[in-house]
Amino acid sequence: MKSKKAKPTKLILLILGLGLFSYFLFGGNQNFYRYWKYRTEKNQLKKEIRALQVEKAKLIEEIERLKNNPEYIEYIARTQYNMGKKGEKVIKFSKGDNK
């Protein structure tokens, strides 16, 4: 007879345990789901910050080169803006098919 009473008690304890587990997992202000979500977002933002710091360092280096290196300024003017020195002729080639 005792084994029949033990089974409903175990079932009630199991249901109660699952209920408590679900509450701590999904309920309340400091739940596991929010913690995991914020931790994931924090890690993603850290990666983004590192990438932006690298980009910032490259831009600072570019600014210094533009301030202090006339040859680099000339290179940029020629390659990106199709400029030439006085007396030079700049020839532009189109990339399309010329038939």
Image (tube, rainbow, N blue to C red):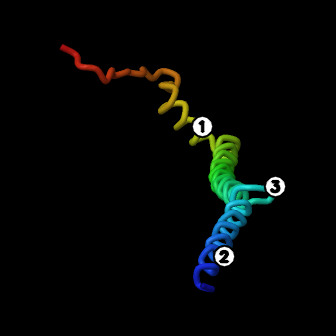
Q: Report whether residue 57 is seen.
A: no
Q: Name the residue type under label 3.
A: Asn
How many angstroms separate mark 1 from mark 3 (CA)?
57 Å
How many angstroms separate mark 2 from mark 3 (CA)?
31 Å
Q: Nearer the viewer, mark 2 or mark 3?
A: 2
Q: Nearer the viewer, residue 99 or 81?
A: 99
Please tell me which residue is depicted at 64% across the width and 45% down the height of the picture: 62
Q: Name the residue type under label 2.
A: Thr
> Which residue carries the number 1 mark?
73
Label 1 crowd bin: few (<14), some (14–19), many (20+), radius 10 Å: few
Q: Quadrant of the C terminus?
A: top left
> Which residue carries the number 2 mark?
9
Please tell me which residue is depicted at 67% across the width and 54% down the height of the picture: 37
Using the image, determine if residue 75 lies above or below residue 22.
above
> Which residue carries the number 3 mark?
29
The tag on residue 26 is none
